[in-house]
Image (cartoon, rainbow, N blue to C red):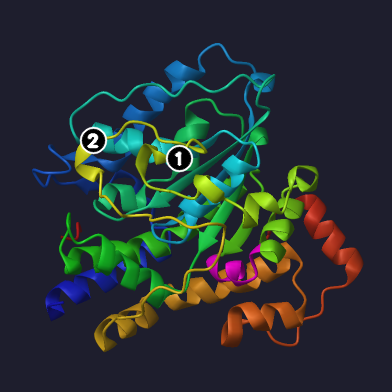
């Protein structure tokens, strides 16, 4: 990446990390391919909010299903979670809000999201990912769009997803360059990773419980999945076979699975082989082919610290003991921590942790 672009990226990264208010209304210039006209970020989100509100019109609070919304940068294992929750019996949606945003950027009018009946489906699961292709989808806050459209905060639980920064960036560069240059993907990756502060702050301001889940926990998939369901208050719905035995339901691409509901989006985003398949929920090591320059960028912009913070929060949220944390996260595992049983019970019950355009 050219030195001038890298300096601009670092300056913008500071704004995102510090949650600068100007980001909400920043101008998103068109690219002629994925975003056909210029628009401010807040105006684009308002357009999606209006369409969502049409689908929510007339619903009372009890008519909204309890919504477990998994959010993180792209390529953090979120589609596998989609499948796992689908096999556990949840209507499981693949980035419904971002699909509407992409449709808006393409100059089309997205369809409203019609929620399932709470009598049949009292709970739903969605994954929403940050990035990778446009700056707008690297900065929008899905929860904000949902809540402003009328989704009750009392019916939302945010699951913040993370993955080792070098491995997830390597996955972006391996899988996604058909639609964006490597330099643009690197820039959007940094922005997407740092946007966690804005997303989490919005959730906390509106009283939405927050759980952290880091992909490396899936090295021990049954332990991780069981702990996640317990954290969410869903132990009664957990079953090992939803984790270990996907059988014919392990194909994760497109419409090949009945466990994941894929809302419509522009066909340009259809990339065969993006998600692959597996026989169960498990850790995929992936590659680690980032350059020294990219590695330095992850450190200097604070992306690595975001990951470290997420690991520590995940260990606390899932109630992992020191030995398990060390096996799963290695040098990133918190050291010397002791969480009393009474305190951990309180954490689990609360279900929360308190704690420039670039082209």
Q: Does the magenta stretch include residue 217?
A: yes
Please report the residue visible at 45 percent of the width from the left and 42 percent of the height from the top.
142
Q: In this view, does 258 lie above or below 317?
A: above
Q: In which quarter of the image is residue 69?
A: top right
Please report the residue visible at 52 percent of the width from the left and 33 percent of the height from the top.
147
Measured as percent of width and height from the top left, residue 49 is found at 40, 28
Q: Is residue 141 left or right of residue 314?
A: left
Name the one closer to the observer, 300 or 161: 161
Residue interval drawn in magenta:
215-221
How far is the residue under mark 2 from the one under mark 1?
20 Å
Q: Do the residues labelled 2 and 1 touch (CB within 8 Å)?
A: no
Q: In which quarter of the image is the C terminus?
A: bottom left
List the residue tagged with mark 2. Answer: 266
Q: Quadrant of the N terminus?
A: bottom left
Residue 95 seen: yes
Measured as percent of width and height from the top left, residue 190 is found at 33, 67
Question: Is the residue marked by circle 1 packed among few (<14), some (14-19), or many (20+) residues within 10 Å?
Answer: some
Between discs 2 and 1, the one toward the N terminus: 1
Report the residue that reaches farthest toward the front: 248
Is label 2 in a helix, a strand or a loop? loop
Please report the residue visible at 20 percent of the width from the left and 46 percent of the height from the top.
28
Q: Quadrant of residue 273?
A: bottom left
List the residue tagged with mark 1. Answer: 257
């Amino acid at each position: 990446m050219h030195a001038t672009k890298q300096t601009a990226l670092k300056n913008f990264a500071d704004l995102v990390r510090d949650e600068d208010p100007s980001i909400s209304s920043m101008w998103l210039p068109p690219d002629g391919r994925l975003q056909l006209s210029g628009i401010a970020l807040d105006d684009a989100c308002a357009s999606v909010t209006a369409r969502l509100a049409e689908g929510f019109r007339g619903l009372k609070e009890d008519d909204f299903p309890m919504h477990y919304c998994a959010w993180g940068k792209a390529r953090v294992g979120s589609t596998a979670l989609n499948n796992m929750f689908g096999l556990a019996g949840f209507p499981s949606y693949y980035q419904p809000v971002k699909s509407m945003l992409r449709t808006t950027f393409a100059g089309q009018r997205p369809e409203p999201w019609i929620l399932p009946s709470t009598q049949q489906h009292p709970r739903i699961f969605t994954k929403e990912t940050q990035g990778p292709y446009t700056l707008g989808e690297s900065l929008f806050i899905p929860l904000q769009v949902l809540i402003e459209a009328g989704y009750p905060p009392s019916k939302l639980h945010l699951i913040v997803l993370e993955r080792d920064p070098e491995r997830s960036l390597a996955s972006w560069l391996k899988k996604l360059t058909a639609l964006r240059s490597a330099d643009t993907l690197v820039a959007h990756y940094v922005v997407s990773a740092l946007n966690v502060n804005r997303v989490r702050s919005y959730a906390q301001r509106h009283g939405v419980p927050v759980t952290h889940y880091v992909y490396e926990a899936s090295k021990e998939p049954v332990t991780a999945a069981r702990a996640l369901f317990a954290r969410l208050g869903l132990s009664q719905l957990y079953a090992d076979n939803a984790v270990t035995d996907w059988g014919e339901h392990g194909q994760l691409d497109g419409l090949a699975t009945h466990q994941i509901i894929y809302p419509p989006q522009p066909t340009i985003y259809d990339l065969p082989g993006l998600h692959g398949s597996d026989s169960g929920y498990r850790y995929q090591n992936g590659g680690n082919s980032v350059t020294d320059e990219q590695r330095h960028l992850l450190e200097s912009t604070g992306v690595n610290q975001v990951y470290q913070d997420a690991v520590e929060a995940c260990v606390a949220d899932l109630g992992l003991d020191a030995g398990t944390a060390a096996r799963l996260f290695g040098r990133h595992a918190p050291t010397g921590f002791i969480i009393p049983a009474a305190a951990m019970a309180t954490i689990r019950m609360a279900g929360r942790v308190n704690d420039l355009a670039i082209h």
